[in-house]
Amino acid sequence: MSQSTSNFAYAMPASITDTVSLLSQASSNGVRCQVLAGGTDLLVQLRSVDPDPRTIVDIKSVPEVSRVEVSNSERGVFIGGAVSAATMTHHEGLKAILPGLVEAAYLIGSTQIQGRATLVGNLCNASPAGDTIPALITNQAVCEIHGPRGARSLPVEDFVVGVQKNALEAGEFVVGVRMPHPSARTADAYLRFIPRTEMDIAVASAGVSVTLDDAGVCSAARVAIGAVAPTALLVPDAADALVGSTLDEASLAAAGRACTAASSPISDKRGTAAYRRKVVAVLCERAAASAAERARAR
Amino acid sequence: MAKTHVSTCINGQDAEFLCSPEQTLLEVLRDTLHLTGTKEGCATGDCGACSVLLDGTLVCACLMLAAEAEGHDVTTIEGIASGNDLHPLQQKFLDHAALQCGVCTPGFIVASKALLDEDPDPDEESIRYWLAGNLCRCTGYDKIVRAVQDAAAELRS
């Protein structure tokens, strides 16, 4: 087995089918294989914790993975697996309807990192502090996965299964993520806390999406939190605290408390568990207020 | 080991090279093509010393495989001046003494060019955020920010 995995190789398949067959063949031959999109996590891992040889499968020549589709139909919004954070932050159509998701992409690393790093790569890397994951969950995003047994879909909250673990099986890769086009008077926001202003990893984070009715009452909401548990979490209790309210101070505070209750953070150099539990509530309240303001303006 | 053949365009000229699958663009630029203006600082995407433009987008050459450059345009610090005429950013870095040891400077110039290509009149806050991925241990950044502002003013005039 070690013989067959002793060399690096680089492959650039031009279709979903070719990608799946490369990944499947490698897997059945016991050859280690890894998908390359932006590479900003993969190349750092190669340099540090995990330098072992493998076949690198660059998916950027697969036409579907470079696509951004914004449709008002049931197809909704599709963001391909190789779409970079920089592409998202320059995409006026996305910014107009998913400002919170674009904010999350804009928070990843530096300008240089955003030039390569992809939304789906941030998701697949499955860091507890990954900025785009709560924002994707908030927007009901679903992973479109292709593999040897065909295509399947998996909601983002079920795709991330542990610290740096995702639900992909052998031979599978994520072609992109799809989410509903937000209806009128619906908007999202994402906030994270870091000890400085740039270039750091979330201590805690919260994404909120709200829908308002004509009277300004919240008729639907989704709340997701990051960096306060092994995976980003959907917090239905926080959403319940918002629905039926005018997003007044009391309901925002109740949503914040629900986020604290759902958290099971660790203490590390970025913050203690107690601090994270407190801060995640504040972030939820502020993100909800920001999402509400945007929803009123839509 | 099988080498990958890559055809690319570097600083406006067609360039071809052979690389190993795991070689980074930074390694090929420096060791194969001898374009040593691009520096290796951290080699993990934290310091920005290896900043280059890929089809006009600012990236770290250390976080790209050389094979990924196939069919793309790469601009390095060597492609910023016009012959012997320094780019205004280069001249303003000199005028404002925006460098001491100089290892970070190619990265700062390339990153600043990407900023000014996108926003000809950035305010100080925008400059500082844009350049947050470029580390300098000598200058304390103020002179760099002033040099970028001055270069932007000259390019606008």
Image: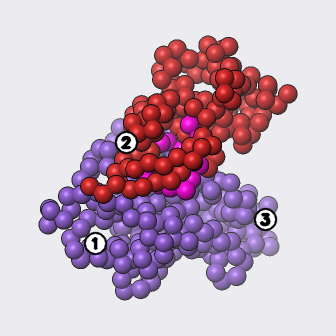
Chain colours: A purple, B red
Q: Check disc 3 and give the amino acid type.
A: Arg
Secondary structure of the residue carrying numbered label 3 = loop
Give the residue number, with chain letter if any, for mark 1.
A26
State whether residue A88 is above or below residue B93: below
Q: Check disc 2 and give the amino acid type.
A: Thr
Secondary structure of the residue carrying numbered label 2 = loop
Q: Check disc 1 and give the amino acid type.
A: Ala
Chain for mark 1?
A: A
**Quick check: marks 1 and 3 in contact, CB under 8 Å?**
no
Question: Looking at the figure, which quarter contains the N terminus of chain B?
Answer: bottom left
Q: Nearer the viewer, residue A164 or A15?
A: A15
Instruction: State the image quarter where residue A11 is shown.
Output: bottom left
Q: Mark 1 or mark 3: name the one nearer the start of the chain.
A: 1
Alpha carbon distance from label 1 to label 3? 49 Å
Check residue A272 in the rendering and tell me which mark sits there, or answer none.
2
In the rendered image, the residue lying farthest to the right is: B157
- Magenta stretch encompasses residue B34: no
